[in-house]
Image (spheres, rainbow, N blue to C red):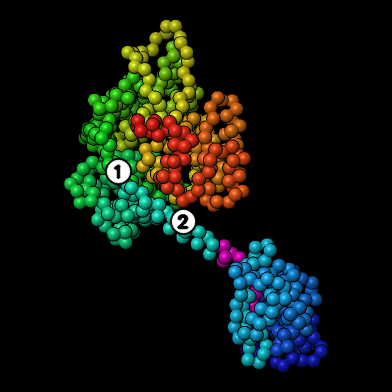
Amino acid sequence: MSEFPPVPGENRGHNGIAGETSDSFLQAAMLDAVSEALNAAFLVYDRNDQLIFASRAVRNFVPAPSSFFEPGTRLRDFLAGAYDNGWRDQGENAAQSRDEWLSRQISAHWKERSEQQFCDDSRRWTRYSKRRLPSGYGICVITDITEQKKREDQWRADLERVQLTEEILDNLAHPVFVQDRSLQLVAVNKVFCAAMAVGADNALGGSLNAIFEAELATTLTNVSRHVLDTGMSSSVTLNMRLYGDPSRPILTHVQRVGKPGRYFVVASLGEVGSMATTVEIDTGLTGGTPSKLSPVVDPKLDQRLRGRKALLVTSDREFEAAALNTLEILGLDSCCVRNDDELDAFLNVALSVGVAIDLAIVDVQMDVRCLELIQTVDVDYITMDGYQLSTELAFTVLDRLTALQAAPSPVDDWEITTEESVEPLKPSTSPSLVLVAEDNEINQIVFAQILEGLGYAYRIAATGEEVVRLWQELAPAIVLMDVTLPDINGFDAARRIRELEHATLITTPIIGVLSQAFERDREGCYSAGMNDVILKPLSPDIIDAALTRLVPSIAKLASLA
């Protein structure tokens, strides 16, 4: 049906199309069926701009009285009803008055082809597609495009986030590369491209084998696979060539970000510090072959760990030998218990005689009761598997014991006896730890890279509940709080922290992190008890200035690490 017949007389059918013949009813039924099949509404009007058909679906778009949809209704009256029910222009060229809006619409209906989009008061988007036939009859198709608009907005937001992430990565001082679940490169920054003399287009979509030498690529791939599978970060020192220079030790930190099903592996390359040296550690887990992956501090160069006490919890003799060897190189006093009963007895005696354990290293193969026992006495602890002994133990111990705590007074011995008891253990605090609340995996990468580059120790929480829990466990120096968190938002998390502080004598500074500079969000941060506000996109200068402004001592503590 390419064109409708001439307008009949005054008689109109009851099904929404002119005339009372069987053909009229058939045409109305067909148009309604097509309307439902296309999930759209149809309007048909004659050369005098009077309606001759309105499908039932029109009422889903214009909740007006039924008289507006009767054949013979003037198009102007129909449009006036649409305007009164919320249809409006959007954008800079929006009409300012009702009469102006109606004039624009009538004019558009007389164009051979035209298309407009409207957003009503309930934020529903509608496409209004019109065509005027040579005979003067007009057809209008009305379609709900709300979901399409949402997808377009989401696509634009995702594109902006990707562009923002690329800009942030490109401004980082260290080479960074990101791998997906199949360990294919999905992002590299400009510094990485310059260091490896490779273009971004050539690197993306490929594997590490196309960039690094075969042996080095295999090692990095194994580390990335382990981090992806376990979720445990690793730090290794490997000899590699950057910027065409001779091969030298490069510290590579690898971590997993994202959510289940959307995990990514992020690796950053940095120079090994002057206080660090690569030593051979026999892990006992590789057939006696020494591993050169773990950088540790030469005790001759750094005495900060002297006098610190570490407790090892494992039933694996090889794990015990490898861990004790590393702890000895670091200069710690350490011993080992091999089951939960030994651990319980050891902790009770230590508590009774006032021996403070600085750190417990727990084998992941041990029973969960071991962790419960350690938590009851507020001893800081880390969990490790056999692989991590050669890639992460030294770094983690250094991070916990040099960045988070002041050095203790030296003691000659820490042998446990049953003599007169002294003051019991007290929970340790973290005067240089930055606790970050951020659920977006891309922003987690940004925070990690910036804080790591600035030299601050940090922990990242992905939910509001988690940040409150970690605040209680770690007693951080400061909290960076994103306000859009799952479960409880950043405002409520800050309020809960402030409520819990009533039972303590310490107030933790909290900085709100906002995506938009809306005044209501700023006021919400301050009313929730936050001390300051910073805006995304973040930069090292912004974060460093905020941290040193609220916690001046944190930079001094971080510089000791």
Residue at image location 19% in from the left, 48% down from the top:
245
Q: Nearer the viewer, residue 463 or 478?
A: 478
Quadrant of the rendering where the C terminus is positioned: top left
Q: Which residue is mark 1?
A: 270
Residue 391 lies in what quarter of the image? Answer: top left
Residue 346 lies in what quarter of the image? Answer: top left
Is-magenta flag for residue 148?
A: yes
Taking the image as shown, residue 142 lies to the left or right of residue 393, namely: right
Instruction: Return the x and y of residue 269 as percentages of the image width and height.
Output: 30, 45
The circle drawn on residue 161 is 2
The residues colored magenta run 139-151
Q: Nearer the viewer, residue 533 or 346?
A: 533
Q: Mark 1 is on which residue type?
A: Gly
Considering every residue shown, the one lying at the far top of the view is 420
Residue at image location 72% in from the left, 79% down from the top:
54
Q: Residue 269, can we see it?
A: yes
Residue at image location 40% in from the left, 50% down from the top:
264
Q: Nearer the viewer, residue 414 or 340?
A: 414
- Tell which circle, 2 or 1, labels the residue nearer the N-terminal end: 2
Q: Nearer the viewer, residue 57 or 48?
A: 48
